[in-house]
Image: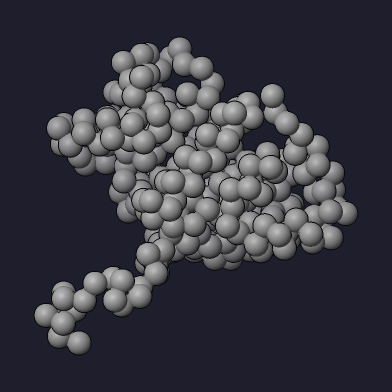
Amino acid sequence: MTSSQASSTSVEELELPLSAGFLRAEGISRSFRGVKALAEVTLEIPRGRITGLIGPNGAGKSTLVNILSGYERPDIGSVAMNNVDITRQTAHQKSRSGVARTFQHGHLFRSLSVLENVQVSALANGSGRRQAQRTAVGILDRLDLLPWGGLSAGHLPHGVERRLGVARALATAPEYLLLDEPAAGLNDGEMENFRNTIHSISADLNIGVLLIDHNMRLIFAASDYIYVLAGGQNVLQGDPDVVRSDEKLATSYLGTIASTLAKPTS
Ligand SMILES: Nc1ncnc2c1ncn2[C@@H]1O[C@H](COP(=O)(O)OP(=O)(O)OP(=O)(O)O)[C@@H](O)[C@H]1O
């Protein structure tokens, strides 16, 4: 195909999937002083989809997020983004490459305003001042955070603080967004809003979302595909209906945890 043919052909005509590209962890192992946190774990996060990751405490979920986002290095295994090996990139380099994450415990600048927190993320990722301002306002609008923009991030209701964590991650213009227990402590209404928000982030912005949470109702309602880890290993994966009905989830200790955590949080 010549370049003029290529430029006159739209994506729709080519029938290319909007969700092309993925972030992939392949055969990841990681130990801490002899404790094996992950053993040959593989997981794939396609763009434009929500991938759920569940498992009991200590299963290795956060360690995997730390490795995907560059906060930890694997002992063995690789991380690839859109088929490019990014295993050895630092957290900052991965962020620049297009991998963003939230943290279980905030990581906000509490003395800055909500708007400033988002601007700082955009600036740190290379935006100029004006662009950072525009980006921050647009993201606050998308996440219904504009009314909070001028308030100090140190005194926010829990649900707002959680959304601000997502806003900061979005300000780095990611292709992939890793959400580590973003809904902890949200009530049912906030949870439903949050689910709609991450759905629009993945579908409208074509972002690949990894969603880790102990709330099974959120995970099963929001995810297009689910991975289950236990003891640092892949134990089960598939569409939500497949995972829900698999006897490994229903009859093992995972099932006990799942049913406990599926209770309403409010
Ligand atoms: N920095 C570290 N130093 C020592 N051990 C660690 C470290 N990080 C994780 N571990 C251990 O690795 C294992 C996996 O922990 P990890 O936090 O990844 O699990 P998790 O599935 O995220 O758990 P949770 O649901 O409780 O957050 C645990 O045994 C944990 O104690």
Question: How far across and how far down the image is residue 208, in percent?
Answer: 45, 54
Front-most of 199 and 251? Answer: 199
- At a point 56% along the width and 29% down the height, the residue shown is 190
**For the view shown, which residue lies furthest in the right direction?**
251
Give the image's coloring scheme: one colour
- Total residue callouts: 0
Front-most of 244 and 117? Answer: 244
Quadrant of image for the C terminus: top right
- At a point 36% along the width and 14% down the height, the residue shown is 151
Question: In the image, is residue 14 above or below residue 115?
Answer: below
**For the view shown, which residue lies furthest in the bottom direction?**
1
Front-most of 94 and 33? Answer: 94
**For the view shown, which residue lies furthest in the left direction?**
4
In the drawing, does residue 21 fall left or right of residue 258?
A: left
Question: How far across and how far down the image is residue 177, in percent?
Answer: 44, 47
Question: How far across and how far down the image is residue 248, in percent?
Answer: 82, 59
In the drawing, does residue 154 fall left or right of residue 55?
A: left
In the drawing, does residue 256 fall left or right of residue 51?
A: right
Residue 72 appears in the rendering: no
Residue 141 appears in the rendering: yes
- At a point 33% along the width and 31% down the height, the residue shown is 141
- At a point 59% along the width and 44% down the height, the residue shown is 212
Question: How far across and how far down the image is residue 235, in percent?
Answer: 73, 60
Quadrant of image for the N terminus: bottom left
In the drawing, does residue 127 fall left or right of residue 84?
A: left
Question: In the image, is residue 112 above or below residue 236?
Answer: above
**For the view shown, which residue lies furthest in the front direction?**
13
